[in-house]
Image (cartoon, rainbow, N blue to C red):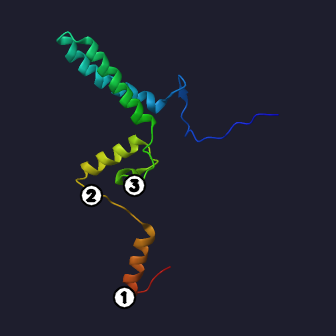
């Protein structure tokens, strides 16, 4: 009997050290860098072990953000709307939403074309289709 590989969608990301994709490694590094700030603060008051715990903790949080997806569940509104998407994509979209002061611009070509056709018909103009 032969063995066959099951195809999977890895989106072109290579794996480093078996668990880290490139994106997860970057997010883990960013999280660990944030933890380093706490390490330096706690090392000033001679609590280096607590600072090291912060480095590891923020590194794990960064890894989770870069690797995992939002669970697909109907229990909460956020998981119902964003279920199955990467956590970092959801965070980026939220930051963009807050930066735009709560405005979302959606362009639907089919609907805008229908509005245009309806408007032209009401005005009695000629429609080029």
Q: Is residue 11 above or below residue 102?
A: above
| Residues tagged 1 and 2 counted as in contact (Cβ below 8 A) | no
Task: Confirm whether residue 51 shows in the render.
Answer: yes
Residue 69 to residue 16: above or below: below
**Image x and y of residue 83, in percent:** 44, 50
What residue is pinned by disc 2? 103
Residue 4 at x, y = what percent? 74, 36
Mark 1 and mark 2 lie on one chain; the one further toward the N terminus is 2
Does label 3 or label 2 sit earlier along the sequence?
A: 3
**Which residue sits at x=29%, y=45%?**
95
Residue 61's image quarter? Answer: top left
User: Which residue is the site of mark 3?
Assistant: 81
Residue 42: numbered disc: none
- First reached walking from the N terminus: tag 1 or tag 3: 3
Q: Quadrant of the N terminus?
A: top right
What residue is at 29 percent from the left and 51 percent from the top? 97
């Amino acid at each position: 009997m032969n063995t066959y590989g099951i195809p999977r969608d890895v989106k072109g990301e290579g794996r480093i050290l078996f668990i880290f994709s490139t994106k997860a490694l970057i997010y883990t590094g960013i999280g660990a860098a944030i933890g380093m700030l706490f390490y330096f603060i706690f090392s000033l008051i001679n609590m280096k072990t607590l600072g090291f715990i912060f480095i590891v903790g923020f590194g794990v949080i960064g890894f989770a953000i870069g690797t995992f997806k939002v669970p697909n569940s109907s229990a909460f509104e956020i998981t119902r709307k964003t279920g199955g998407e990467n956590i970092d994509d959801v965070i980026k979209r939220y930051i963009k939403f807050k930066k735009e002061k709560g405005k979302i611009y959606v362009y639907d070509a089919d609907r805008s074309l229908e509005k245009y056709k309806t408007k032209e018909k009401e005005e009695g103009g000629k429609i080029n289709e």
